[in-house]
Image (cartoon, rainbow, N blue to C red):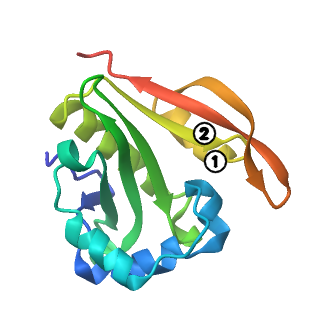
């Protein structure tokens, strides 16, 4: 099985044609709190990002994958990122976005997460993955816990929102097979 193909989705590198998706998603102020974004991205900046995304994870310490459905003519529905790659300690962070709410709750995020975990453990041969999730993001917490992640801590009043302060959970999955 291809390391970047799941049952429902496939993960792939960003292409120049993805610039409009990324422009729309990165500039959606409703989800900025998920990535600590405070300013919009220009098409030019995103074009440069895509052009530089050919860098190896060992060089860039991060990589972004586009999430395509294996049905519906490979429709692109989101992204999954690996960040804060630490090759010495064999760990990396994971972040996922299913951009269109019509595709949430249908198993696509779970399949993408399973696929990236397989890639991280079997291809990159890392020991662990981690993520940070706002304490009020119950669906994301449930998703990661369903894939074996454990909550290992909470940062109280960590994220400033329009409605006040929200805590953030740290979650971790350790590869027990290696």
Q: Position of residue 154 (x, y in %)?
A: 68, 28
Sort mark 1 into few (<14), some (14-19) or many (20+) by Cα contacts within 10 Å: few
Q: Quadrant of residue 80?
A: bottom left
Q: Quadrant of residue 167?
A: top right
Judged left or right of residue 45, residue 119 is: left
Point 25% across, 28% down: residue: 126
Q: Position of residue 16 (x, y in %)?
A: 24, 80
Q: Position of residue 34 (x, y in %)?
A: 60, 55
Point 28% across, 78% down: residue: 73
Judged left or right of residue 137, residue 12 is: left
Q: Which mark is residue 99?
A: none
Q: Which mark is residue 139?
A: 1
Q: CA distance from mark 1 to mark 2?
A: 5 Å
Sort mark 2 into few (<14), some (14-19) or many (20+) by Cα contacts within 10 Å: few
Q: Quarter holding the C terminus?
A: top left
Point 68% across, 47% down: residue: 137
Q: Position of residue 70 (x, y in %)?
A: 28, 65
Q: Quarter holding the N terminus?
A: top left
Describe the element under mark 2 as helix, strand or loop. helix
Using the image as rendered, state which of residue 19 and residue 7 is in the foreground: 19
Q: Quadrant of residue 120?
A: top left
Judged left or right of residue 164, residue 75 is: left
Point 39% across, 45% down: residue: 113
Residue 149 in sight here? no
Describe the element under mark 1 as helix, strand or loop. helix
Q: Is residue 56 above or below residue 142?
A: below
CB-based contact (under 8 Å), mark 1 and mark 2: yes
Q: How many numbered marks have been drawn onto this rendered protein structure?
A: 2
- What residue is disc 2 on? 142
């Amino acid at each position: 099985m291809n390391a970047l193909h799941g049952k429902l989705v496939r993960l792939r590198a960003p292409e120049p044609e993805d610039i409009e998706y990324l422009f729309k998603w990165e500039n959606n102020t409703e989800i900025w709190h998920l990535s600590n974004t405070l300013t919009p991205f220009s098409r030019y900046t995103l074009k440069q990002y895509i052009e530089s995304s050919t860098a190896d994870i060992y060089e860039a310490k991060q990589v972004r994958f586009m999430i395509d459905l294996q049905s519906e003519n490979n429709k692109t529905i989101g992204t999954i990122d690996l960040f804060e790659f630490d090759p010495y300690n064999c760990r990396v962070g994971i972040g996922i976005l299913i951009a269109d709410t019509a595709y949430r709750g249908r198993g696509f995020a779970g399949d993408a997460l399973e696929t990236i975990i397989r890639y991280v453990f079997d291809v990159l041969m890392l020991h662990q993955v981690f993520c940070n999730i706002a304490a009020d993001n119950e669906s994301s917490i449930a998703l990661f816990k369903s894939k074996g992640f454990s909550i290992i801590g909470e940062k109280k009043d960590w994220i400033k929102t329009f409605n006040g302060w929200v805590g953030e959970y740290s979650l971790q999955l350790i590869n027990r097979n290696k």
